[in-house]
Image (tube, rainbow, N blue to C red):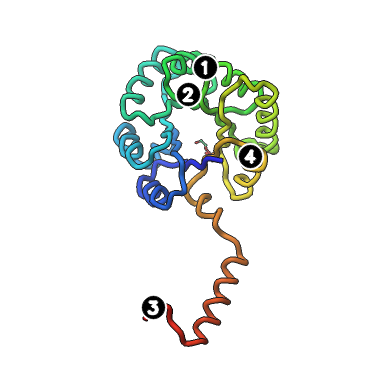
Amino acid sequence: MKIFADTADLAAIETLAEAGLIDGVTTNPSLIAQSGQSFLAVIAEIAVCVEGPVSAEVTGTEFDQMMREADVLRAIAPNICVKLPLTLAGLRACRRLSAEGCSTNVTLCFTANQALLAAKAGATFVSPFVGRLDDIGLVGCDLLHDIRQVYDNYPNLQTQILAASLRSANHVQMAALIGADAATMPPKVIEALAEHPLTRSGLEGFLRDWAATGQSILQ
Ligand code: G3P
């Protein structure tokens, strides 16, 4: 499963990319607003930092504006993936961009039917929002199961499932077990994937015993 960092925090992206932990980056207008930076400038910087896809979202709601914005975004770097909302206008723009060979990410997906339409529109990725379904009392990971099943039923559908709105290491593990193609998450969730209390306490024990020997590997 590919791991994407869901952030516009350049320093965090650089650290994760150096460690080889991420395969790409996703952003949305809220994350750009949080960063306090210029949208086009920060996307250009991120696109240099990682080789994989960098999702940059249009903000227009009508087809013509989406297409004009997409032209600006895709000119930034070859690894820009144009992110579009799962609306009829967004799907139409997705179809046009996909036909032109542009990578696309259809976002704000909450049902398997929506994911089916994204695939019909030729989306490179569809982003089901797991955490936001949990927020309203549903089981967000059920949506990943449903989309996986629909896509597997019809192998001509080539869209990759990009599990999004993941808030915990458990969400990520579920996404991987279900067979999501990719998962995007905040840097703190990526860091949490490495954590286990027995790893921490085991290391403390090893270091205590090592210190008692009085030895040093470095002479
Ligand atoms: O980037 C889209 C998605 O991952 C947002 O997550 O936590 O705001 O629901 P969240």
- Name the residue at 51% across, 50% down: 190
Determine the secondary structure under disc 4: helix
Q: Which residue is mark 2?
A: 84
Label 2: few (<14), some (14–19) or many (≥20) C-alpha neighbours in 10 Å: many
- Name the residue at 31% across, 31% down: 40
Question: Which quadrant would residue 167 be assigned to in this image?
Answer: top right
Q: Which residue is mark 3?
A: 218
Residue nearer the viewer, 36 or 119: 119
- Name the residue at 44% across, 39% down: 24
On screen, 219 above or below 8?
below
Q: Are marks 2 and 1 in contact (CB under 8 Å)?
A: yes
| Circle nearer the viewer, 4 or 1 | 1
Name the kind of residue labelled 2 in the image.
Leu
Residues under labels 2 and 1: Cα distance?
A: 8 Å
Q: Which residue is mark 1?
A: 91
Q: Are marks 4 and 1 in contact (CB under 8 Å)?
A: no
Which of the marked residues, 4 or 3, is nearer the chain's N terminus? Answer: 4
Q: Which residue is mark 4?
A: 135
Looking at the picture, how far across and down is residue 123, in whole percent? 52, 22
Q: Quadrant of the C terminus?
A: bottom left
